[in-house]
Amino acid sequence: MSHNKDGKNRNDIKPGLNVNIVLKADQRIGKLTQGIVKDILTNSGTHPHGIKVRLEDGQVGRVKEILE
């Protein structure tokens, strides 16, 4: 089962994970912001643009990478 940790599957994302997200304001330029997941905001199991999360510092964006 090849399945990379690109942040599109809700099951891959848990509070406390270190992730790179794209903030709404940065979507056009694709700038990544690193942080720790506090809350998962997307209810569906998958999302084509990445699962939306809130970081511990309060920023909200879509997960682009899950950092090991």
Image: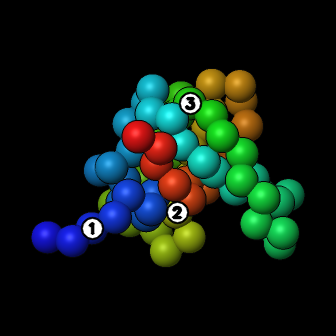
> Alpha-carbon distance for marks 3 and 1?
22 Å
Any part of residue 36 in sight: yes
- Depth-wise, is mark 3 or mark 2 nearer the camera? 3
Quarter of the view holding residue 17: top left
Given contact means CB atoms under 8 Å apart, are the residues at marks 3 and 1 in contact? Answer: no
Choose the circle earlier in sequence order: 3 or 1: 1
Q: Earlier in the sequence, mark 3 or mark 2?
A: 3
Locate the C terminus by quadrant.
top left
Q: Residue 6: where, in percent of width, then height?
A: 44, 62
Q: Is residue 31 above or below residue 16?
A: below
Name the residue carrying label 3: 36
Residue wearing tag 2:
50
Point out residue 47 in the picture as x, y percentages from the top left corner.
Answer: 46, 68
Residue appearing at x 51%, y 55% in the figure: 65
Q: Secondary structure at mark 2?
A: loop
Q: Hey, what amino acid is under mark 1? A: His
